[in-house]
Image (cartoon, rainbow, N blue to C red):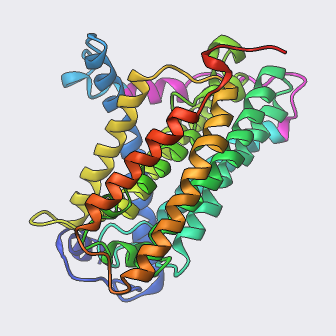
Amino acid sequence: MLANTLPAIMSSNAALASDWPGNFWWHWIIFSIILLVFVLVMVLAFVYIERRAMARMQARLGPNRTGPFGLLQSPSDALKVLLKEDIVPSNADKIVHLLAPIVAFAPLLMIFAVVPFGDGALLADLNAGILYVVAIASMTSVGVLMAGWGSNNKYSLLGAMRDVASMVSYEIPLVLSVLGVALMAGSLSLNDIVRAQNIPFVLLQPLGALIFFIAGCAEINRSPFDLLEADSELTAGFHTEYSGMKFALFYLVEYGEALAMAAVLSTLFLSGWRGPVLPPWMWLLIKIVVVFFVMVWTRTTLPRARIDQLMALAWKFLFPMAIINFLLTAIEVLTFPDGLPWPMIFANFAIGAVLVLIFSRSYKVGWGRVSIE
């Protein structure tokens, strides 16, 4: 049954039924397997893409010995980490130390349950899909905090506290940027949002897409916001006392969060699976890789921010701009109830550029240096 029906989801442009292939349990089993394999394979691919792309940007070679073009380097590293000894500090909270990577990894898989790979091709089409994603994504920080507390290490605890602080701060502008998309689509379902994007929302909501990208990178601790793992200050942050398979799970969570963030951004702003000629799932995959490449690009280009800069960026820069963007979007939706016309693309880009310029001119943190009073 699986062999006969799986090609349908990969090639058909027709909408799939909510219980495809006609049975709830088969639907649940097939999509669960697809999502698990998709996350694991894409994480390995992301590790390879990041290492090779950063090497090219920094005039290096990157991994190129294990397998053709170094393609087997990521699986080899994964196998090596899994075979390493699991060392637990003698004074650590053994139960919390064990459960932390599991608690961090489980919500990651749950996010993909509402990400559509085609029209109706998703595990569960929730009518509150965006709220589900925001709520589930925040749960990963609980696992990070458990790791910092359970390790009985002050550096680990400081790294975990930084993660919670950044998550709480950046969650607000991120949610406000998502609300603009919900207003324009008239739905909270991710599949309905993709259907509503006759014009990709990144063109009608350029400021919202920028805020979502920056806030998302800060929430998942991608450079230049990776302060919870700052090796010069915290040795390795929350996972200092982890090794073996537990460390591998945290490593999987790190790149899995980048995958989830790229998938959600592609769905909300880049019209998700929609596109000509190619199958829907391939369009989504291309957009996910493009978003991740931009994340690698910013990591290679920008230096790591200080903790005061991290907090100020959220509250003094992104938060007010997100409120203004939300109010402007509400006004536009009321003005054009049948959908925004294409000339609004130029207007919204101009408004976004002016707002970024104004707030960047007034945005100062310690005048570029660490200030002590």
Tell how many labels.
0
139 over 297 or under it: above or below = below
Image quadrant holding the N terminus, namely: bottom left
Image quadrant holding the C terminus, namely: top right
Determine the residue positioned at 83% across, 41% down.
95
Q: Could you tell me if residue 214 is visible in this image?
A: yes
Determine the residue positioned at 47% across, 74% down.
331
Q: Could you tell me if residue 102 is visible in this image?
A: no
Q: Which quadrant would residue 356 be assigned to in this image?
A: top left
Residue 152 x %, y %: 86, 26
In the image shown, does 229 or 34 lie closer to the viewer?
Answer: 229
314 over 7 or under it: above or below = above
Q: Residue furthest left?
A: 277
Determine the residue positioned at 47% across, 61% down.
112
Query: What span is in magenta?
Result: 74-95
Left or right of 288? Residue 108 is right
Residue 151 x %, y %: 81, 28
Residue 59 x %, y %: 26, 10
Q: Which quadrant would residue 368 be assigned to in this image?
A: top right
Determine the residue positioned at 26% across, 22% down.
70
In the image shown, does 144 or 245 lie closer to the viewer?
Answer: 144
333 over 263 or under it: above or below = below
Q: Residue furthest right?
A: 91
303 over 3 or under it: above or below = above
Residue 48 x %, y %: 33, 30
Question: Does residue 90 belong to the magenta stretch?
Answer: yes
Question: Does residue 166 belong to the magenta stretch?
Answer: no
